[in-house]
Image (spheres, rainbow, N blue to C red):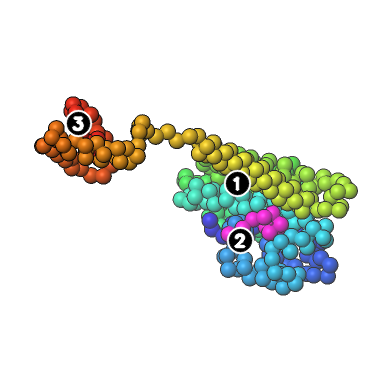
Amino acid sequence: MSEKFLLYSSVDYPENLKSINGITFTKREIDVISGIVSGKSGGTISLYLGIAPRTFEVHIRNIMLKLSCNSRDRVINFTEQTATFNAFYNHYLQLLLKYAFSSQLKKIERLISKQQIECALVFDDHVEIENDYIKQINTILKDLGISAKIEKSLSSSPNELSVIKFDSSTEGKNISANTINLEQQISYYHFIFSILETVVNHPSFQDIKNEFQTQYNLFEKGLSPIFLAKEESTIDKIIPKSIFLRLFIVVFIFSIIGFSTYLLMKSNNKNKQLNMDNLEQPIRSDLITPVSTAFLERPDIINKMKERLQGEDGIKTIALTGIVGIGGAGKTTMARYFAKAISNAPILGN
């Protein structure tokens, strides 16, 4: 957005913010402190103030030097200790409203960029308006591309402003006029919109005006609690509101972390218990336990072999059967079943 529209200001700078405990602050430093108090980042503050981020850092450095501190939290603590926190926050809301107004002016500039508009503003000579205020109105109209003449004259209605628009689009200038009651204007911004409503002829202008009114209503709600602030309660005197809120947030966060940790540990203990229960269950083997032990029967088998091989009726021929395979494949078991299947088998073993 063009920075020229951010130069217009109806923002007040209270005397109690210009000098605090003997420390003097410039208007821009007050703007920066108000942004810090509101918890905004440097980029956001730079945006609505219309300054470069580096310029913002320079102001921050100067403020910290004046306060002999090295952090933004210390700046906030300074406003709390000097009872200027609400005043700075109120100033911040006024800056936001100013930024919203500047944004709407930029939209109007685009609407009438191809139009040639001439007008005259006629104040009553008895109206007490500062010259700087009149110059600012003239500057706004000029930056919008509107050629304006500001005059004073005697009239029967001293609280009115006459806005005269000259239409040069037709042969022979047509004149349209409107009267604005100064006492009925809600704010500086509404006064400017009342003037523009007469000289800007575009169907989208009313939408822009309504949008600003919506924003103004929101800011007005934000300002009211500060203007109507009552005496602080006992707890607020002991612990400033912002610090009390921070303590509450910290306690709340740690409570959530503690409860989450408890649930996680409880879940892990339950899983460990299930694993232990599984380990305690007996392991069943698929192997069949032999009825007799082959190694214990070998001496008897050897004696039987000797008896069969000796004597006239001994065995003359021996048939040997071999089974080849990898270890654990069941060769021994197969050989024993084979031997049992043969009648008068002399050998049962492995």
Q: Give the image quarter of residue 60.
A: bottom right
SS at circle 1: helix
Residue located beneath label 2 in the image = 42
- Say which amino acid is labelled 2: Gly
Q: Earlier in the sequence, mark 2 or mark 1?
A: 2
Tell me residue 100's x, y (percent).
61, 49
- Say which amino acid is labelled 1: Leu
The range drawn in magenta is 34-43
What predominant SS class does the magenta segment belong to? helix
Q: Is residue 150 above or below residue 191?
A: below
**Which label lies toward us, 3 or 2?**
3
Q: Earlier in the sequence, mark 3 or mark 2?
A: 2
- Say which amino acid is labelled 3: Ala
CA gap between label 3 and label 2 equals: 101 Å
**Which label lies toward us, 1 or 3?**
3
Tell me residue 332's x, y (percent).
25, 38
CA gap between label 2 and label 1 equals: 34 Å
Tell me residue 237's x, y (percent).
86, 52
Left or right, 200 with respect to 76, comes to: left
- How many neighbours does mark 1 have within 10 angstroms: few (below 14), some (14-19), or many (20 or more)? some
Residue shown at the point (20%, 43%) measured from the top left: 325
Residue shown at the point (60%, 46%) measured from the top left: 196
Residue shown at the point (78%, 44%) measured from the top left: 225
Tell me residue 131's x, y (percent).
72, 60
Q: Earlier in the sequence, mark 1 or mark 3?
A: 1
Numbered mark located on residue 345 in the image? 3
- How many neighbours does mark 3 have within 10 angstroms: few (below 14), some (14-19), or many (20 or more)? few
Kindly check if marks 3 and 2 are in contact, taking CB atoms under 8 A apart as contact.
no
Numbered mark located on residue 196 in the image? 1
Is 320 one of the magenta-colored residues?
Answer: no
